[in-house]
Image (cartoon, coloured by chain):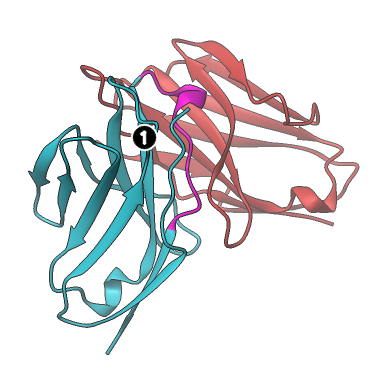
Chain colours: A cyan, B red
Amino acid sequence: LAKTTQPISMDSYEGQEVNITCSHNNIATNDYITWYQQFPSQGPRFIIQGYKTKVTNEVASLFIPADRKSSTLSLPRVSLSDTAVYYCLVGDGTGGFKTIFGAGTRLFVKA
Amino acid sequence: DTEVTQTPKHLVMGMTNKKSLKCEQHMGHRAMYWYKQKAKKPPELMFVYSYEKLSINESVPSRFSPECPNSSLLNLHLHALQPEDSALYLCASSQSEGGQETQYFGPGTRLLVL
């Protein structure tokens, strides 16, 4: 199992770009990197997924270096509503117990 | 439809009660999951049904019993729970595509055991 390590918490201000880095030193060749967002008392919500280099969608970007031992979730111009917990997961797509949530990063956006 | 629904939203039960949590998805996903989440902790995987075959987290006590009547429905039967089982119970589904996997989560059931 590829274990992930993220900062426990981060603070930011509205309008700033936020970068959250996840370390996954023993990532396997077939593993993808997926990020989820979770608000209190709600289920996690998929944000973005990638395998290598850079992926961008309407809410975030994901940067993955060539060695794939880490990844960075980039949230452009955060707002108060982006205050949430962000989880990085690494897995090979077969699901089940091969993909496990790490501790997550609690992002707090201030006005 | 990318929605996973869970009922009930809230549940209060005594330690001698039997209750069930329900989960439903109509995305054609063939994998469904039960997670337990305590406050300020990440979701912890309890059970996985993949193509209606069950995989179990060995640390989950037998007072939790999953059931998958068909590929769209998932139940979690609860019996003789303890107060420490109070938590948010999340259901999720996924369909692996080319090695990628996105899990779609329901809103959860908030369980309180008295």
Residue A90, quarter of the rendered image? top left
Q: Secondary structure at mark 1?
A: strand
Instruction: Locate residue A25 relative to residue A33 in the image: left or right.
Output: right
User: Looking at the rendering, in which quadrant would you find the C terminus of chain A?
Assistant: bottom left
Near-viewer residue (B113 or B19) = B113
Q: Answer few, some or many: residues within 10 Å of disc 1's Cα (few below 14, many 20 plus, some between 14 and 19).
A: many
The residue sitting at 13% across, 67% down in the picture is A76
Q: Nearer the viewer, residue A42 or B69?
A: A42
Residue A26: x %, y % from top left? 40, 31
Is residue A99 part of the magenta span, yes or no? Answer: yes
> Which residue range is magenta in the image?
A94-104
Residue A86: quadrant of the picture: bottom left
Q: Is A48 placed left or right of B39 in the picture? A: left
Residue closest to the eye, A89 or B97: A89
- Residue at image point 47% right, 25% down: A98
Q: Against B54, is A10 above or below?
A: below
Q: Residue at x 83, y 42 (%)?
A: B81
Answer with left or right where residue B6 lies relative to residue B47: left
Residue B88 appears at what percent x and percent y?
60, 52
Main SS, magenta residues = loop
**Residue B52 part of the magenta segment:** no
Task: Identify whether A28 is placed above or below A18.
Answer: above
Along the line of sight, which residue is nearer the eye, A32 or B96?
Answer: A32
Q: Residue furthest bottom?
A: A111
Q: Is residue A78 something one can see in this rendering?
A: yes
**Is residue B73 among what the camera can see?**
no
| Whether residue B38 is situated above or below residue A96 in the rendered picture | below
Q: Amino acid at mark 1?
A: Val
Which residue matches tag 1? A90
